[in-house]
């Protein structure tokens, strides 16, 4: 073999070796791509799983999916409780039935401001409820419910009466029962009417279950309070002839009034000196609702027949000594009652007056 032949053979072998290496590289490339594809698929699967878990947790904590339609011994619709504790925003409602007569409803959510707590309680109340001396539970600052359901409510608290013939009421027991609702966390209801709807529906549910179960209830009338205003001292509480001219706070503060309703259809009015932290110095009411009027039996208030129904003219006055009364120019209690009762009876077109102040 000549030197030329050996050189050609070397070049041929080198070329074959290079081609082999190139071919080997081409055969190895699909393996690396497959491994990369496998890692990408796994990452996508993990990411999808994380999204599903996060979405599921978000749905659980921010919606009522899977929650029963009724909670709290069946008294309350879940949707009604959710509305009271946060309206249409995100959050989940749960309930703890603490006893046969109590229940705590909570709203949970990830976002700030989506939490809240509502406590419901069914309990006996003294015969004087809701007109406790010095602390009326019905007033000119609250909505008043009458007709099918009797009660009152504001933005954070409310109650409804349960019929005395229902719910195991015993003969000779003068205590009625009431269902109360208190928002204890999360601030007042954005729309107080939501609390009124919850109480009305729950009260009717309880009455229906405890009585004849017919589920038939007369329509409930919801009377909203008017905005607080400066009192017209010649027409206090909007009642013609109810005059307290010259009355003022101990330092000359003007009188403010809060009124729910009218004398003709039922009225509740609070009178306070502007800026007075002690609250109203007087509350007055023209009570034609039979369920409320029953709580005023034996209290010595004037009664009259007005528009075909018995009506009570009730009042609650803050205690003042002679010096305080002189500073405010308020009449003494008997004179106050007489002025209010005379004007209110005329405004309500009453006849056949009995009892109380003349």
Image (cartoon, rainbow, N blue to C red):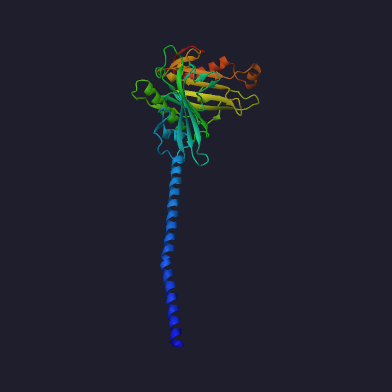
Q: Is residue 243 visible?
A: no
Q: How many marks?
A: 0
Left or right: 313 in relation to 278: left
Residue 192: where, in percent of width, then height? Answer: 48, 32
- Along the viewing direction, whichever of 271 and 118 lies nearer the viewer: 118
Dividing the picture into quadrants, the one containing residue 29 is bottom left
Residue depicted at x 51% and y 19%: 131
Residue 256: where, in percent of width, then height? Answer: 57, 28
Decide: is 296 above or below 117.
above
Decide: is 94 above or below 162.
below
Decide: is 111 above or below 146.
below
The residue at the far left in this view is: 214
Specify the quadrant that holds the N terminus. bottom left
Residue 15: where, in percent of width, then height? Answer: 43, 78
Residue depicted at x 45% and y 84%: 6
Q: Is residue 116 visible?
A: yes
Left or right: 177 in relation to 249: left
Residue 43: where, in percent of width, then height? Answer: 45, 54
């Amino acid at each position: 073999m000549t030197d030329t032949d050996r050189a050609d053979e070397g070049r041929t072998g080198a070329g074959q070796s290079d081609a082999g290496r190139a071919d080997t590289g081409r055969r190895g490339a699909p393996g690396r791509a497959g491994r990369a594809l496998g890692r990408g698929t796994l990452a996508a699967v993990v990411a999808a799983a994380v999204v599903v878990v996060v979405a599921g947790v978000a749905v659980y904590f921010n919606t009522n999916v899977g929650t029963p339609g009724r909670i709290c011994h069946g008294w309350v619709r879940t949707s009604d409780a959710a509305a009271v504790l946060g309206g249409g925003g995100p959050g989940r409602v749960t309930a703890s039935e603490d006893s046969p007569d109590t229940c705590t409803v909570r709203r949970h959510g990830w976002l700030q401001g989506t939490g809240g707590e509502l406590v419901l309680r069914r309990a006996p109340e003294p015969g004087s409820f809701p007109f406790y001396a010095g602390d009326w539970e019905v007033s000119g600052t609250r909505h008043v419910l009458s007709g099918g359901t009797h009660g009152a409510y504001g933005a954070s608290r409310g109650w409804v009466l349960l019929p005395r013939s229902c719910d195991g009421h015993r003969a000779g027991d003068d205590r009625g029962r009431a269902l109360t609702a208190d928002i204890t966390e999360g601030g007042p209801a954005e729309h107080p009417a939501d609390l009124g709807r919850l109480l009305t529906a729950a009260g009717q549910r309880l009455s229906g279950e405890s009585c004849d179960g017919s589920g038939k209830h007369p329509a409930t009338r919801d009377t909203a309070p008017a905005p607080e205003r400066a009192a017209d001292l010649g027409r206090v509480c909007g009642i013609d002839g109810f005059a307290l001219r010259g009355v003022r706070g101990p330092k000359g503060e003007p009188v403010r009034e809060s009124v729910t309703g009218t004398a003709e259809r039922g009225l509740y009015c609070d009178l306070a000196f502007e800026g007075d932290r002690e609250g109203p110095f007087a509350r007055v009411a023209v009570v034609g609702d039979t369920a409320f009027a029953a709580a005023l039996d034996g209290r010595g208030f004037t009664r009259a027949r007005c528009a075909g129904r018995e009506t009570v003219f009730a009042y609650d006055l803050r205690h003042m000594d002679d010096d305080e009364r002189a500073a405010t120019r308020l009449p003494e209690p008997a004179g106050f009652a007489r002025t209010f009762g005379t004007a209110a009876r005329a405004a309500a077109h009453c006849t056949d007056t009995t009892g109380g102040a003349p």
